[in-house]
Image: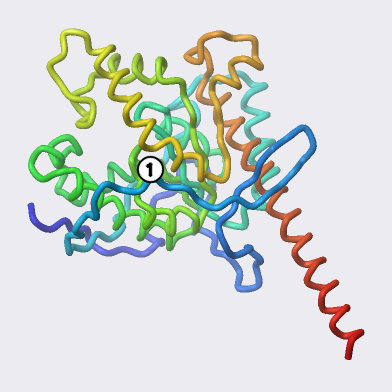
Amino acid sequence: MDVLRLESCSTRNLQPCCNSGLQNPGRISKGSVWPTGTWKYQQQQTLACSVRPLKFRRPSHQSRLHTFSIFCSSYNGGCTVSETDTCSNEEALDLKKKAEEISFGMDGKSIFLVGMMGSGKTTVGKILSEALGYYFFDSDRLIEEAAGGTPVAQIFKEKNEEFFRDAESKVLSELSTMHRLVVATGGGAVVRPENWSYLNQGVTVWLDVPLEALAKRVVAVGTESRPLLGQGSVDPYTQAFAKLTELIEKRGEAYGNSNAKVSLQKIAAELGSIDVSDLTPTTITIEVLKEIGIFLRCRNKLHMNGVANAQSNSYKYMRKL
């Protein structure tokens, strides 16, 4: 398996989420304003926005890139909320309301969910795509399709992590050219600075889950499909927790580059719950929409301030003439 390939396709071949009523993915109009550069919001009690540069840990060595091409294939990741979560009528209405509130501000931009393995990116992503009428993609599943159905764990075994990361970058590159997508990315996608040039074509959201909860989740479903966790321990939880701790130390700073952060521990505390496992996927998705809304408002505020400053500088310049 030296070359991974998918048949090239256009966005018209993509399958929308069920019941979304979406026929073709929308595109950004030429006149749309989206500030250049990479920045994120910081939320305080009052809406305070600031610009911060991206941060990465310096890699121990430069990886040699493999030469192969991956193109996006039609992947039906659509679902209805009922297929992924049982929610109350109140939650369903809140979900719809929050989705409607950000739809206009999104202007067709895609959403990229980042976070550790087991953080719920796929589950939340499907509900989010259904609420917004977006398409859903799981980048790991696309890589597996490109490899003829070969599981990620087997790709790691037969090749290596570098080969997988190259494939991952190719997939993200293709997805970044499309609009109205919700993409569940791989846990390590944030480490490569190259990938941020793709992720920043949309809005990035970090699902931050406590390590204890992550370890319980991945052990409960089995670690066989998680090649970075290792196998054969007499105490799978301890081994998973130790490995996840090691991974978050390497990736945490990069996750922090996301436009929005959704902390499950914070949500649980606000709801008076101790265990984050008590949170429903719909509750988490509503919080994702809230955080995206805050980011969009902050983006607009920064843009308006930038326009005002530019106009002021122009006026001062004209007065000197």
* Residue with the mark numbered 1: 185
Give above or below for 100 relative to 281: below
State the image quarter where residue 212 is shown. Answer: top left
Locate residue 100, reporting x and y percent: 67, 43
Q: Residue at x 10, y 37 (%)?
A: 157
Residue sitting farthest toward the right: 319
Front position in the image: 91 or 231: 231
Front position in the image: 48 or 226: 48
Front position in the image: 20 or 321: 321
State the image quarter where residue 92 is shown. Answer: top right
Instruction: Say what amino acid the circle numbered 1 marks.
Output: Thr
Locate residue 301, reporting x and y percent: 76, 53
Position of the C terminus by quadrant: bottom right
Locate residue 180, reporting x and y percent: 51, 53
State the image quarter where residue 57 is shown. Answer: top left
Q: Residue at x 40, y 34 (%)?
A: 122
- Colour approach in the figure: rainbow
Q: Residue at x 20, y 31 (%)?
A: 227
Q: Is residue 300 left or right of residue 55?
A: right
Q: Is residue 33 left or right of residue 14?
A: right
Front position in the image: 59 or 97: 59
Locate residue 231, reporting x and y percent: 15, 21
Residue sitting farthest toward the bottom: 321
Crowding at dot 1, Cα within 10 Å, few <14 / some 14-19 / many 20+, comes out as many
